[in-house]
Amino acid sequence: MSRLRLAILDLYNGIPNQGMRCIREIVEQFSDLIEYEVFDVRVAHHLPDLSYDIYISSGGPGDPREGDGTWEGLWGNWFDEVLAYNESHKQKKFVFFICHSFQMAVHHLGMAEVTQRKSLSFGTFPMHITAAGEDDPVFTGLTDPFTAADFRRFQVIQPDPERMEELGATILAIEKERPHVDLERATMAIRWTPEIVGTQFHPEADADGMLEHFSRPDIKAEVIAEHGREKWIRLMGDLTDRAKISHTHDSVIPGFLNRAIKVLAPRVEVAG
């Protein structure tokens, strides 16, 4: 059979980053079944058409409620077109949103508040799986709570129950409760439809790559200066624990891709 076609929407605004490398490496694990193309959304204003079977829209810098007046509108039009296509076709398009894209999708559809955090979320944190998320294919094999990489200045909070119900969307994961912190827990994962899902954390983050990055003397010094030595030590500990970041990396996006392949190419056997 011909391979499924996947589009990666790069929202990093031309800034060198680990996220795109990680996304590519995960997708390339499925190279016998999937071929992919990268679209530079923010610099080149380049968006994929509807000829692709699967889409992954990346994280990125800046305020997810704003853009340059062009690219965010193009991105919103693309999302609307995918939703409209899925409503009118039996074979659907599959979409995965990561962090910045997740926040944009929520804001675009008016599903919750998207606000700036009091401080930067930086490092590895526990995530709590909701009842709706327990049997979701993207969390197969993960414990509750599970550990994920989380780097963001903005947050999705106060989901609108009526709007969520209208869209048929469900919350799959939230920030782990911290009784000593008097702040609302953010919504960390949402499933819009059986084909469309996203996370506010970074499931693509790989432990080995992050370990190498944060072990660099200049990066180590920067993290300690901005966040403290204890934060750096805890981050490095989570990265070396194979049951934490590595497990999340191996479960979430691969679970999404396995599900897409099973639906779009049901005669092909895939792991999981």
Image (cartoon, rainbow, N blue to C red):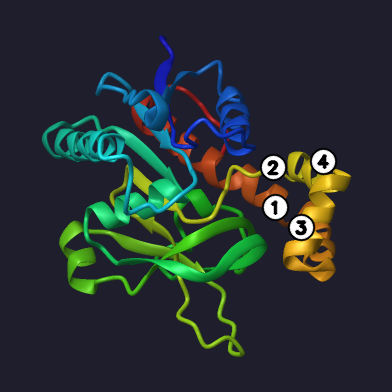
- Element type at mark 4: helix
Q: Residue at x 73, y 63 (%)?
A: 226
- Element type at mark 3: helix
Instruction: Give the distance between the C-alpha atoms of the residues marked 2 and 3, in whole angstroms.
Output: 18 Å
Identify the amino acid type marked 1: Ile
Q: Position of residue 160 (x, y in %)?
A: 24, 71
Q: Check disc 3: other Cα within 10 Å, few if <14, some if 14-19, many if 20+.
A: some
- Any part of residue 241 in sight: no
Instruction: Give the distance between the C-alpha atoms of the residues marked 1 and 3, in whole angstroms.
Output: 19 Å
**In the drawing, what numbered circle is on residue 223?**
3
Mark 2 — residue?
206
Q: Check disc 2: other Cα within 10 Å, few if <14, some if 14-19, many if 20+.
A: many
Instruction: Give the distance between the C-alpha atoms of the residues marked 4 and 3, in whole angstroms.
Output: 14 Å
Mark 4 — residue?
212
Which of the two labelled residues, at mark 2 and mark 3, occupies the earlier sequence position? Answer: 2
Identify the amino acid type marked 3: Val
Q: Answer whether labels 1 and 2 touch (C-beta < 8 Å).
A: yes
Mark 1 — residue?
245
Which of the two labelled residues, at mark 1 and mark 2, occupies the earlier sequence position? Answer: 2
